[in-house]
Amino acid sequence: MILAQAFSNFVLDLDGVLWRGERAIPNAPETVSSLRDSSKTVLYVTNNSGASPAAVAEKLAAMGAPAGANDVITSATAASLLIERTIPAIRGRVAYVIGGPGLIEAMEGLGLRIVEGKDADDASLVIVGIDKKLTYDKLRHATRAIRAGATFIATNTDPTLPAADGLWPGAGAIVAALRTATGVEPLVAGKPHMPMLDVARERLGSAPALVVGDRVDTDVLGAQAAGWPSALVLTGATGLADLAVATAWPDFILRDVSMLLRDLPHPLVRPAAGPDLPTIATLLHDGGLPAGSARERVGRTVVAEFDRSVLATAAWEVLDGVALLRSVAVGPKARGFGLGVHVVAGALKGIANAGVRDVYLVTTDAEGFFKRCGFHVVPRDELPDGVARHPQITRECPSSAPVMRMELPQ
Ligand SMILES: [Mg+2]
């Protein structure tokens, strides 16, 4: 199944999908160029309000993905719509803005009179987005205005911003400071809230779009609120550990955005049942893994199914409050399509649902794969008793096989 052929409209998030900071994600610009070359409609939606749509379009073009300003919707665009919908007689109103040039430009475009410093005391609106020049004084002015009754509007509440060297504080961290200082909940414009996707829907007309993003709490939930399908890419803020504890699940999981162009089995990952056992036994046998007590583990096993065939499986055991992930196998003909990631994600979700947060595994030949999933190697003398005594560790795998661990978020 090639997602690029299955949909006509694509709504792509930017940070963590197309780029991280100033660096393009490998193959991402080529992917969107290819979508546009095949007459697909591509809109870019970003909760980042720092740059104007025109500046974002220039950045896209410089990376090799030509776009017009009208193809870009920022949370500043969405904040404009939110203000137009909720605030009467906008023109000439006094507003205090914490944010970058993109947000200030959008607010001036509405006819608001933007003030600075102590003049914030006169503001009837406080609009807050990402501000890389944030100071205590800015927080102080905004706090005073909100406490005096100004309407508090947030472009978005993303806790972090993916950068080339890791995650930086996002607009949500600034909004949280003001929420704490004022006790006031803001009106929010960006994903997963509707103003942003309403702008996208207006520009696309009625046809559904595939939303591609790197966050469950904004991109996937936003898509679900709009009634559109979603694809999560693993190149940004969300890893498998985060996905395991997320409140929603994407329709598709992609290693990166270029997977839109590839012919991949996009499986349904579901709990295993009795009739799956013969197929599971074959998968384990082909993977050189002991089938052992697969029947006893069937309630703690997931399978990835595509086109009515079970192509991959993973299972787990719970030992003294920690989990042992085991029996991860992908059929020989289905390898290299990301199915291993799907079943590991499904198993981690099962483990998280059981209230367990500490996950171990031992592997003889897949250390690199599990590292990409987010596991890291731990010394054998630091294992909890239940894991250290498990036959898989003591007998079934050689003592040189690395033991790996992942901690799921609370
Ligand atoms: Mg993102």
Image (cartoon, rainbow, N blue to C red):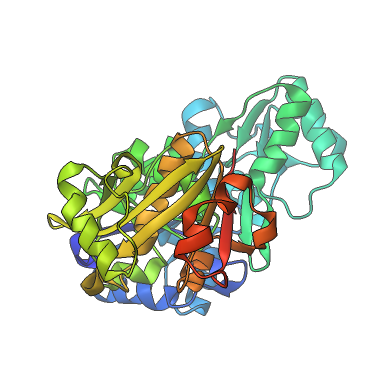
Q: Give the residue at x 87% y 35%.
A: 118
Residue 127 found in image quarter: top right
Image quadrant containing the N terminus: bottom left
Q: Is residue 121 above or below residue 246?
A: above
Tell me where residue 142 appears, x and y as whole percent.
77, 33
* Residue visible at 69% across and 55% down in the picture: 382
Residue 40 visible in the current orientation: no
- The answer to whether residue 270 is left or right of residue 325 is left
Number of on-image labels: 0
Seen at 59% across and 74% down, the residue is 23
Q: Name the residue nearer the viewer: 297 or 178.
A: 297
- Residue 323 percent location from the top left of the image: 51, 45
Residue 241 percent across, percent down from the top left = 52, 50
- Quadrant of the rendered image containing residue 123: top right
Regarding residue 247, the answer to whether it shows in the image is yes
State the residue in front, 192 or 294: 294
- In the shown orientation, is residue 254 left or right of residue 312? right
Of all residues, the one furthest to the front in this rendering is 395
User: Residue 45, percent across and down?
Assistant: 45, 54
| Front-most of residues 243 and 112 | 243
Given the current orientation, which residue lies at the most extreme left position?
Answer: 308
Left or right: where 11 falls relative to 1: right
Q: Nearer the viewer, residue 115 or 91?
A: 115
Q: Which quadrant of the rendered structure holds the C terminus?
A: top right
Residue 265 lies, with reference to residue 406, above or below; the image says below
Judge left or right: residue 89 versus residue 260. right
Q: Is residue 65 above or below residue 354?
A: below
